[in-house]
Amino acid sequence: MADDILDRLQATIAERKGADAGASYTASLFQKGRARIAQKLGEEATETIIAAMGDNPHAIVPEAADLLYHLLVLLADAGLSLGDVRMELAKREGLGGLDEKAARTPAGLPLSFRP
């Protein structure tokens, strides 16, 4: 098994795909489908933001863990992995954020503002 906790979590998530949804939260997410997984990811992102706005920075940590977990479930459901994300980050390494964003979106607009 991998040494990195995220790699181990990714492997566990992959093992749960197709498992008994009554015995595994992860399997139940896969059974409910990508829309539900994406909804949970959004909920966890919101909870992370709320924690970040509070006075206790340590409150961010468990929310960030939930966020990463649900992101890994979404990636697995789409047939993707941390390796795919790592490759994308490697392609962007050394690029300025504004230059990278302009190169991948029409007129540099973020996804939410594309026509």
Image: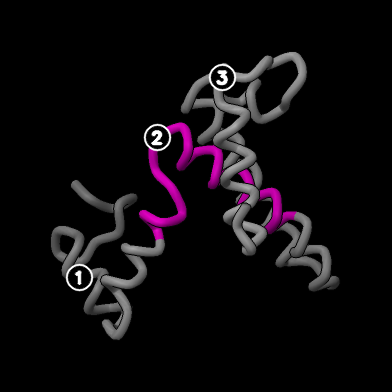
Q: Nearer the viewer, residue 80 or 95?
A: 80
Left or right placement of residue 90 versus residue 47 in this view: left
Mark 1 and mark 2 lie on one chain; the one further toward the N terminus is: 2
Residue at (83%, 72%) from the top-left corner? 55
**Amino acid type, mark 2:** Ala
- Based on the displayed image, in which of its 4 quarters is residue 5 positioned? bottom right
Between marks 1 and 2 in the image, the one whose residue lies nearer the viewer: 2
Q: Choose top left, top right, bottom left or bottom right for residue 48.
A: bottom right
Identify the residue shown where x is 33% and y is 50%.
112
Q: Residue furthest front?
A: 1
> How far apart are labels 3 and 2 at the CA level?
14 Å
Residue 25 picture location, percent across and down: 72, 27
Q: Answer left or right for 58 relative to 72.
A: right
Which residue occupies the foreground of this view, 102 or 33? 33
Q: Which mark is residue 34?
A: none
Q: Which residue is mark 1?
A: 102
Name above or below for residue 35 compared with residue 92.
Answer: above
- According to the picture, the residue beneath numbered tag 3 turns out to be 18
- Indicate which disc, 3 or 2, sits on the residue closer to the N terminus: 3
- SS state under label 2: loop
Q: Which residue is mark 2?
A: 78
- Which is more N-terminal, label 3 or label 1? 3
Quadrant of res 109: bottom left
Provide residue 51's location: percent of width, then percent of height.
75, 61
Look at the numbered disc 1 and give the secondary structure of its residue: helix
> SS at mark 3?
loop
Whether residue 77 appears in magenta in the rendering, the answer is yes
Disc 3 versus disc 2: nearer the observer = 3
Q: What segment is highlighted magenta in the picture?
A: 63-85
